[in-house]
Image (cartoon, grey):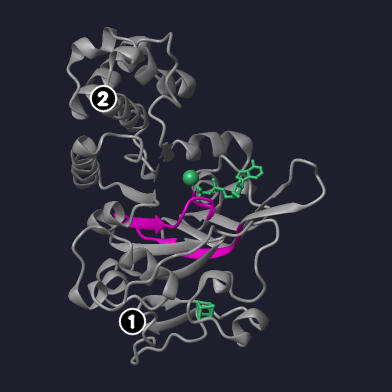
Amino acid sequence: MSTAAPLLETRDLRILFPTQDGRATVKAVDGVSFSVHPGETFGVIGESGSGKTTLGRALVSLLAPTSGQVLHDGENLATLPARVLRRRRREHQIVFQDPNAALNPRMTILDAVMEPLQIAGRSSAAEQREVALAALARVGLAAEYGARYPHQLSGGQKQRVNIARVLTLQPRLIVCDEVVAALDVSIRGDILNLFADLQREFGLTYVFITHDLSVVSHISDRIAVMYLGRLMELGPTEALTETPLHPYTRALLSAEPVPLPSHLRTGRRIVLEGEIPSPVDPPSGCRFRTRCPLAEPRCAAEMPAWRELQPSHWVACHLATPTTPLPQETP
Ligand SMILES: Nc1ncnc2c1ncn2[C@@H]1O[C@H](COP(=O)(O)OP(=O)(O)O)[C@@H](O)[C@H]1O
Ligand code: SF4
Ligand SMILES: [Mg+2]
């Protein structure tokens, strides 16, 4: 584990939204703390509705925290003057699931890749063009793609364009929010390899958000497991996937179609029943208790503490212990 200062840190981060009728509060992110180190790939996994996108947007200051903090290099961006913040924000970029989200259908690919530089406004048109063409080449798109329009490209090519757009700004951190989820399975590996190559070349740091454990377990150094606005478990990828401490992580792992360690494949299959509850009125105590096969009365009464049970391996579950495995969930 790196001993360098964290590139990114959240402290008790909360992001609440009013419901549509304005009468209640959606607790999308509700008390999340973690650090991401320079050069690391930090995976965030959880079902749809667990607050991942909201978290990702807050990490790159597209959403302001309701309370708590997001720190970049130890600095709270919310306290910086607007001009300094604009400059600093370029260092933290986000790529979304929908390859079309950041592309204007009436803009050529070259113009789309030049656009962030034009907004930054610190270089000549010729320089912007040169940087944009180099970024396109770096993501594997030949110069002639620059003259095309988004509808003439495949989903994978459009996602390459989105990566080229953020590369032009020379970011240090890229939040990748389900970046391969909308792509054909056959090309997901190519895009993930591209992210890995760019990380090696530019020393990038990633927060890799996904609902798909098979995606994140291949590329992440550490994984945080999120459920209903809170972290359930956080640890090095190998420890978390081989000796998961939280029943929710185990359920996610046992649902995986990919080959898993034998102790997870046999006799431990846990089926996640029902839907994720509403973040407007989350369960008391442990948020996972309404779907947890191990829940006991204490789980409704007390919120489990966030404990470091193994070195760098954290969990929020009353029953998790460092040495004894959790009881068998189902035969
Ligand atoms: N702008 C918003 N207003 C109200 N509720 C929101 C808003 N954005 C997200 N939510 C709600 O917050 C919860 C978490 O959403 P999201 O962050 O998109 O989760 P995920 O990306 O894990 O699917 C969901 O219940 C969602 O409906
Ligand atoms: S605290 Fe209780 S309900 Fe929550 S995960 Fe642990 S056993 Fe299950
Ligand atoms: Mg999402």
Quarter residue 240 falls in: bottom left
Question: What is the x, y in percent for residue 174?
Answer: 38, 43
Residue in view at x 48 percent, y 64 percent? 273
Determine if the magenta segment contains residue 51: yes
Outermost residue to the front: 331
Q: Please say whether residue 5 is visible from this viewpoint.
A: no
Residue in view at x 20 percent, y 35 percent? 187
Q: Secondary structure at mark 2?
A: helix
Numbered badge on residue 157: 2
Question: In which quadrant will I find the C terminus?
Answer: bottom left
Q: Nearer the viewer, residue 66 or 216?
A: 216
Q: Which residues are magenta?
A: 29-52
Quarter residue 170 falls in: top left
Tag 1: amino acid: Pro
Q: Please say whether residue 72 is visible from this viewpoint.
A: yes
Q: Which residue is mark 1?
A: 331
- Quick check: 151 above or below 179? above
Is the CB of the residue bearing disc 1 within 8 angstroms of ligand 2? Answer: no
Q: CA distance from mark 1 to mark 2?
A: 46 Å
Question: What is the x, y in percent for residue 182?
Answer: 35, 35
| Count of labels in the image | 2
Question: Which one is closest to the eye, mark 1 or mark 2?
Answer: 1
Outermost residue to the right: 23
Question: What is the x, y in percent for residue 161?
Answer: 31, 25
Q: Is residue 176 left or right of residue 21?
A: left
Tag 2: amino acid: Gln
Question: What is the x, y in percent for residue 199?
Answer: 24, 46
- Quick check: 73 above or below 225? above
For label 1, the crowd category at 10 Å Cα-Cα, with few meaning under 14, some 14 to 19 and many 20 or more, is few
Q: Is residue 71 left or right of residue 143?
A: right
Q: Secondary structure at mark 1?
A: loop
